[in-house]
Image (cartoon, rainbow, N blue to C red):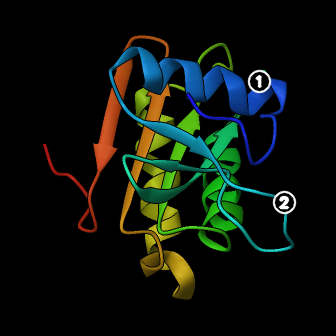
């Protein structure tokens, strides 16, 4: 993990460490008004950690903010209470708004689930 450009916040570090443990290359991006949190395997990526008592709306709002900074997002919902069904609903809602297409790939990591949503919403 490379934090030479800037040090990750505690929330960002939680996500960065999770991804680094998977063997991904994580490089912090320097400060700026509109910037991703990191390059993950060379891809500009925004990290979001949800607060406890999160909802599907919290997922949608987090993705809306992330879409302003990067084409990839990782939402850490561990410990937030957001279920897989709520994460799916939040992603579905996000994909319906005009800037919902800005994120190419997004990933939601929660208690008991880890789902990657490519540009098209997953189906079951």
Near mark 1 (Cα within 10 A), the count class, few <14, some 14-19 or many ≥20, is: few
Q: Is 117 in front, or is 69?
A: 69
Left or right: where does residue 35 sit relative to residue 72?
right
Observer-nearest residue: 86 or 118? 118
Residue 65 in view: yes
Tell me the SS state at disc 1: loop
**Secondary structure type for disc 2:** loop
Where residue 91 appears, x then y in whole percent?
A: 46, 55
Extreme residue in the front direction: 4
Give the quarter of the image for residue 60: bottom right
How far across and how far down the image is residue 81, in percent? 64, 19
Relative horizontal placement of residue 3, taking residue 16 as reference (left or right): right
Residue placed at 70% from the left, 25% from the top?
Answer: 13
Measuring 55% from the left and 28% from the top, which residue is drawn there?
A: 1
Residue 16 x/y as whole percent: 58, 28
Q: Is residue 51 left or right of residue 75?
A: right
Q: From mark 2 to mark 1, how far is it between C-alphas?
A: 30 Å
Residue 51 appears in the picture as rendered: no
- Specify whether 64 is left or right of 73: right
Give the numbered dot on residue 53.
Answer: 1
Q: Residues within 10 Å of mark 2 (few under 14, many from 20)?
A: few
Which residue is tagged 2? Answer: 31
């Amino acid at each position: 993990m490379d934090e030479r450009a800037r040090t990750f916040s505690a929330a960002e570090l939680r996500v960065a460490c999770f991804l680094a443990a998977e063997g991904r290359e994580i490089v912090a991006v320097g400060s700026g008004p509109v910037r991703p949190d990191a390059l993950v395997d060379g891809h500009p990526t925004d990290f979001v950690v949800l607060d406890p008592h999160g909802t599907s709306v919290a997922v949608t709002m987090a993705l809306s903010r992330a879409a302003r900074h990067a084409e990839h997002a990782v939402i850490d919902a561990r410990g937030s209470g957001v279920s897989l069904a709520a994460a799916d609903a939040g992603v579905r809602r996000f994909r319906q708004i005009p800037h919902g297409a800005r994120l190419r790939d997004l990933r939601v990591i929660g208690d008991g689930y880890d789902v990657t949503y490519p540009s098209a919403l997953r189906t079951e």
